[in-house]
């Protein structure tokens, strides 16, 4: 069971690219959120530090400040046959803060703080997929000092040092709804196959009361784990270049590096539907197992005992690769009022091939995990436009298409990844010459998909020579999703 718990936690822990694909949010700029989150080939002042550090060198003011806050209201739905459930997610509140400074005419520097990922999913304690996830809450933060140099009037380069950190909380059932009854059915079948009919009949009076006790948890999670972990500060880089082809066209390229997130220690707390009843029931089960194993000489292929290990006495560590991002963009300005920009973002999800988990102290090392993930690289396509309606008012529209990196047979309700389409709109109003108040709204919808995820019955792992049909379970169905993202920001330059 230790393996089951650690896998549940660490598949989400890093809080950035690879482990949180389902939580990637476009909330690093209110202005750019209104344009489909384009920006690789745009001169955005301090906000360029995220999209393309080379754009910072084109600042036309000495100081440029920008701050903003978004709300992420996401909704997920799972359905299979007549069963369906809607998530009850808590709103996410990603924020950003940028400060850019012009050092010389062709040199600028600054520092950025943002939350590139962060949201939550709540399915409930006793839903049918509780063995995979009940609730998760993810927060990720990035601090990036940046420098940018305009080599010529048309060409600039820039670089930033990314310092990422985050935390995760995850609740997951150790023994989900119906799992105890599943094991009871296996025990009955195993006894029928291994023992004479007369002996099986003699044991039924011992087994029947336990089967009835097990049925109490057919629709409830008997035991769950709450996992908490911090991914310590890890370093990467963000570099870029920007070039004005002429007065109308600008091209840009930027690259955010892969980062290896490390979780040094993770903590686990246990939770029971009814601890007193569950403990009493396990005592009865284990007495029965001892009796059966004694009578059969161990030939019934049943464990000597079952139980919940003391997970809160150990810790775990893991390393996971966080995907790189390569962005290509083109901006076209047909006149002073209109701006059109498009870009392609290549995301190196292929770095997330497997998850490795190591336990300590050494007494837990036998539960180390190697779990295949098999993500593949994907792309995001973005298009946005801005129109200067008046001297004080700019309006924006945008759209993007985000491809899923997850195959159908790896689709997990922790992050039920799917292709997504976003539609965005926004505006900026300048009550003062140097002050801008920004608004945006994004609607993101997932293209509903069918998929499944296969894991092992943890209760059955203690059984030697277990027939293949009893080892694994596949949880699948149809997932759909949408999110609403309003945002507000303020920028000031002088």
Image (spheres, rainbow, N blue to C red):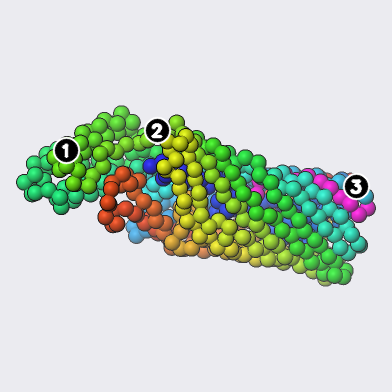
Q: Earlier in the sequence, mark 2 or mark 3?
A: 3
**Residue 354 percent location from the top left of the image:** 51, 54
Tell me which corner region of the image, top left, top right, bottom left or bottom right, holds residue 467.
bottom left
Which of pointers 3 and 1 indicates the residue nearer the eye?
A: 1
Read off the residue under disc 2. 310
Q: CA distance from mark 3 to mark 1?
A: 82 Å
- The residue at 72%/58% (across/down) is 255
Q: Residue at x 45, y 31 (%)?
A: 313
Q: Which mark is residue 294?
A: 1
Q: Please say whether residue 114 is one of the residues in the magenta stretch.
A: yes
Residue 404, given in percent of the width and then of the height, sits at 55, 62
Considering the numbered disc 1 on the image, is that residue within a helix, a strand or a loop? helix
Secondary structure mostly taken by the magenta-highlighted segment of the chain = strand
Viewer-side label of 2, 3 = 2
Q: Is residue 164 left or right of residue 314?
A: right
195 relative position to 1: left or right? left
Q: Position of residue 423 (x, y in %)?
A: 63, 61
Q: Quadrant of the N terminus?
A: top left
Q: Earlier in the sequence, mark 3 or mark 1?
A: 3
Q: Secondary structure at mark 2?
A: loop
Question: Which stretch is magenta?
Answer: 105-121
Q: Which mark is residue 103?
A: 3
Where does the image place residue 125, in percent across and percent down from the top left?
Answer: 40, 42
On screen, residue 236 versus residue 217, left or right, reads right
Badge 3 local density, few (<14 within 10 Å), some, or many (20+)? some
Q: Contact (CB < 8 A) between labels 2 and 3?
A: no
Q: Going 31% across and 44% down the picture, which residue do you hit?
A: 462
């Amino acid at each position: 069971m230790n393996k089951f718990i650690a896998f549940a936690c660490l598949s989400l822990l890093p809080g950035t690219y690879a482990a949180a694909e389902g939580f990637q949010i476009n909330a690093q700029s209110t202005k750019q959120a209104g344009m489909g989150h384009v920006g690789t080939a745009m001169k955005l002042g301090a906000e360029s530090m995220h999209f393309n550090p080379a754009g910072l060198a084109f600042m036309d003011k000495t100081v440029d400040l920008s701050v903003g806050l978004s709300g992420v209201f996401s909704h997920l739905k799972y359905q299979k046959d007549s069963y369906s459930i809607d998530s009850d997610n808590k709103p996410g509140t990603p924020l950003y803060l940028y400060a850019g400074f012009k050092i010389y005419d062709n040199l600028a520097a600054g520092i950025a703080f943002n939350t590139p990922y962060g949201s939550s999913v709540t399915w409930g304690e006793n839903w049918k997929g509780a063995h995979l996830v009940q609730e998760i809450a993810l927060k990720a933060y990035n601090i990036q000092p940046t420098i940018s140099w305009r080599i010529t009037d048309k060409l600039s380069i820039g670089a930033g040092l990314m310092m990422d950190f985050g935390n995760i909380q995850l609740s997951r059932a150790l023994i989900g709804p119906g799992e105890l009854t599943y094991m009871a059915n296996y025990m009955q079948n195993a006894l029928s196959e291994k023992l004479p009919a007369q002996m099986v009949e003699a044991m039924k009076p011992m087994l029947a009361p336990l089967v009835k006790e097990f049925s109490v948890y057919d629709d409830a999670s008997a035991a769950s784990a709450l996992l908490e972990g911090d991914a310590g500060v890890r370093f990467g880089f963000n570099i870029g270049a920007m070039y004005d082809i002429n007065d109308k066209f600008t091209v840009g390229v930027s690259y955010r590096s892969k980062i290896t997130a490390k979780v040094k220690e993770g903590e686990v707390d246990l939770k029971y539907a009814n601890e007193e009843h569950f403990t009493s029931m396990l005592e009865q089960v284990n007495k029965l197992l001892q009796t059966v194993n004694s009578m059969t000489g161990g030939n019934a292929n049943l464990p000597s005992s079952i139980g919940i290990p003391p997970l809160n006495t150990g810790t775990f560590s893991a390393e996971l690769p966080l995907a790189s991002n390569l962005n290509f963009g083109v901006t076209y300005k047909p006149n002073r009022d209109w701006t059109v920009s498009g870009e392609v973002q290549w995301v190196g999800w292929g770095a997330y091939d497997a998850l490795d988990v190591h336990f300590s102290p050494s007494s837990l090392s036998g539960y180390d995990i190697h779990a295949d993930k098999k993500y593949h690289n994907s792309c995001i396509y973005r298009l946005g436009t801005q129109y200067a309606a008046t001297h004080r008012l700019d309006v924006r529209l945008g759209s993007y298409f985000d491809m899923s990196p997850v195959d159908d047979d790896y689709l997990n309700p922790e992050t039920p990844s799917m292709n997504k389409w976003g539609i965005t709109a926004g505006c900026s109003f300048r009550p003062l010459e140097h002050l801008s108040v920004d608004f945006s709204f994004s609607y993101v919808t997932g293209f509903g998909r069918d998929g499944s995820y296969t894991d092992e019955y943890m209760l059955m792992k203690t059984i030697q020579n277990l027939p293949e049909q009893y080892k694994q379970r596949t949880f699948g169905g149809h997932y759909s999703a949408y999110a609403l993202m309003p945002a507000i920001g303020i920028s000031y330059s002088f």
